Image (cartoon, helix red, strand yellow):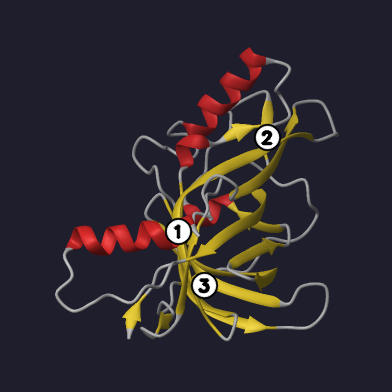
């Protein structure tokens, strides 16, 4: 058996607040990471099209209406293992340095100021903690709007907690996809406690959703005694087909 991490990045969390009125998901102590056999099918995350979407809010002093921001964070890497087209384990790493606001694209200066603040030590502290991780601990098939419940250890700023969210997962040919529900976390649970002393209040809840596309790894038969160069050539030839 081999241990596999689902490094999130998330799960890639941002330290802003949620526009959703959902309660934050329950958190518990980290649990044992799921494992996969050597026979499991491995998929590598396509970081060009996979991301974590975030949404957060604050309320300015003297106002009652929340002001929101939303955006994306890219993934650094990830691997997902399946048996019978069902996810059993995997690893997922987020690149917190790629956090981007999507609601301020028409205001470059405001966009840069927001992104720099969210990346600062007040929030994600990407200089010290550039790669939040999410390690899958359990995957359960469910019925309803979503077909899978995923539990895992989310680690940010050296704080690791186990959380659970729902997602639609599926395999089409050699492509695996994960599209999660919008789920809410409490930034305080992960050591993100900043709030301005005056002017506004940043909400604790943050809404996230995970969008992953992963491609099945090529499997080739290797002749005994084959050199590394020959193996690489075989893999490249397989990938070209």
Report the residue at 18% width, 70% height from top.
226
Residue 146: x and y, percent? 76, 73
Q: Earlier in the sequence, mark 1 or mark 2?
A: 2
User: In the image, what residue occupies the spot 57% across and 50% down?
Assistant: 187
Instruction: Tell me the element at label 3.
Output: strand
Q: CA distance from mark 2 to mark 3?
A: 26 Å
Which is nearer the eye, 35 or 224? Answer: 224
How far apart are the two marked residues, 1 and 2, measured between alpha carbons?
51 Å
Judge from the rendering whether residue 5 lies leftward or rightward of residue 105; answer left or right: left
63, above or below 11, in the image: above
* Residue identifier under label 2: 201
Q: Which residue is mark 1?
A: 239
At 73% from the left edge and 62% from the top edge, which residue is drawn?
181
Q: Quadrant of residue 24?
A: bottom right
Task: Point out the tag, 2 or 3, that comes first from the N-terminus.
Answer: 3
Q: Secondary structure at mark 2?
A: strand
How far is the residue under mark 1 from the one under mark 3?
42 Å
Mark in the foreground, 1 or 3: 1
Residue depicted at 50% across the width and 60% down the height? 241
Residue 218 to residue 240: above or below: below
Pointer 3 residue: 28
x%, y% of residue 148? Answer: 68, 77
**Left or right of residue 129: residue 205:** right
Relative to 19, does residue 3 appear above or below in the rendering? below
């Amino acid at each position: 058996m081999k241990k596999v991490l689902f490094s999130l990045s998330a799960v890639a969390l941002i330290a802003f607040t949620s526009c959703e009125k959902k309660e934050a998901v329950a958190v518990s102590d980290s649990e044992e990471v799921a494992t996969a056999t050597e026979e499991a099918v491995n998929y590598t995350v396509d970081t060009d099209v996979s991301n974590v979407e975030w949404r957060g809010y604050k309320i300015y002093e003297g106002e009652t209406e929340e002001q929101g921001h939303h955006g994306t964070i890219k993934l650094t890497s990830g691997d997902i293992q399946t048996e019978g087209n069902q996810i059993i384990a995997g690893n997922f790493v987020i690149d917190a340095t790629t956090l981007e606001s999507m609601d301020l694209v028409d205001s470059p200066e405001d966009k840069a100021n927001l992104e720099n603040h969210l990346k600062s030590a007040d929030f994600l502290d990407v200089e010290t903690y550039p790669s939040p991780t999410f390690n899958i601990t359990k995957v359960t098939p469910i019925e309803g709007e979503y077909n899978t419940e995923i539990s895992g250890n989310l680690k940010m700023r050296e704080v690791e907690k186990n959380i659970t969210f729902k997602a639609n997962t599926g395999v089409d040919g050699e492509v695996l996809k994960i599209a999660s529900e919008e789920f809410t976390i409490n930034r305080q649970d992960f050591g993100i406690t900043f709030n301005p002393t005056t002017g506004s209040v940043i909400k604790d809840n943050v809404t996230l959703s995970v969008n992953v596309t992963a491609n099945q790894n090529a499997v080739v038969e290797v002749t005994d005694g084959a050199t590394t160069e020959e193996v690489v050539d075989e893999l490249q030839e397989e990938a070209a087909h």
